[in-house]
Amino acid sequence: MNEQEIQIQINDINRKLDIVLEEITLQKQRRIEIEDLIQDVSVIGKDIFQTTVRELDKADVELSGECTMRLGLNLVKNISTFNQVIMMLESAMDFMKDAGPIVHQMGLDAVNKMAEFERKGYFEYISEIGKLLDKLTQYYTVSDIRNLNSNMDKITSIIRNLTQPGILETLEKTTRVISSAQLDEQSDDKPLLKLFKEINSKEVRKSLFFSLRILKEIVKENNH
């Protein structure tokens, strides 16, 4: 074996020794940390135990050694669970800290929106709708609502027909004329001859024939 190969083996041995020493150092560090943890836990546990004993003594509560031992064993067995609970509480506290400003802003927005609704009269409007619904219940029974629901297709068809532009324009003009028209003693108190002349006018004849045609179509539809 030449000198170069010997040096390679020595380097390899040194590298492995470094790894072993590093692992020994880590193990020692972990052992020290565990010992420190055990010492801290023992001090805390002793303090908790003494405090608990004093409080139980004040409350006249007696615990047997067996119960205390079982309690200690259960605590030791569930240390991981306690750690998880503590981590969950810490996460919840962090979340509350982060979400606090957002929740606060949401509350302010909700208050401002409610004030806006109040200013615009929405709540009063809803109150009046509630009163209207109360009155509707006095005049319409549940059976009437069921009948309305069963005939909803026909009602929808009627509404669809009424919303046609031509129909709406005619209805608007008709209602405007009816709302503004009033019985006049001079204009409406005419002799029959004047009435016949009015009937013979082009406008009246067109209106009468149009009305008659509509009535005939209605009769045909009803006879089908």
Image: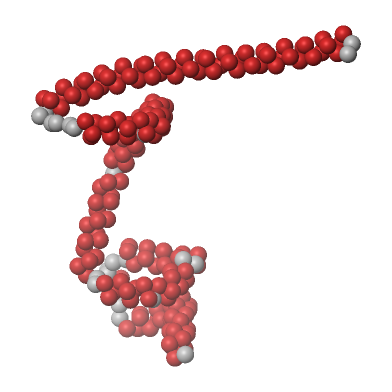
Please identify the quarter of the rendering in which residue 198 is found: bottom left
- Residue 125, position as x, y percentages in the image: 28, 50
Q: Which residue is rendered at x = 32% and y = 74% of the image?
A: 146
The reply to whether residue 83 is visible in this rendering is yes
Q: Which residue is rendered at x = 43% and y = 70% of the image?
A: 156
> How is this picture coloured?
secondary structure
Is residue 170 or residue 51 the one in the foreground? 51
Residue extending farthest to the bottom is 223
Please identify the quarter of the rendering in which residue 106 is found: top left
Quadrant housing the N terminus: top right
The reply to whether residue 200 is visible in this rendering is no
- Residue 133, position as x, y percentages in the image: 25, 61
Q: Which residue is rendered at x = 35% and y = 20% of the image?
A: 41
Residue extending farthest to the right is 2
Instruction: Identify whether 209 is placed above or below 86.
Output: below
- Residue 162, position as x, y percentages in the image: 44, 69
Is residue 61 or residue 17 the one in the foreground? 17
- For residue 31, side relative to residue 109 (left or right): right
Q: Which residue is rendered at x = 66% and y = 16% of the image?
A: 19
Instruction: Identify whether 162 is placed above or below 211.
Output: above
How many numbered marks does the figure carry?
0
Is residue 194 or residue 17 the one in the foreground? 17
- For residue 146, side relative to residue 168 (left or right): left
Residue extending farthest to the front is 1
Instruction: Identify whether 203 is placed above or below 193.
Output: above
Is residue 201 or residue 47 the one in the foreground? 47
Please identify the quarter of the rendering in which residue 105 is found: top left
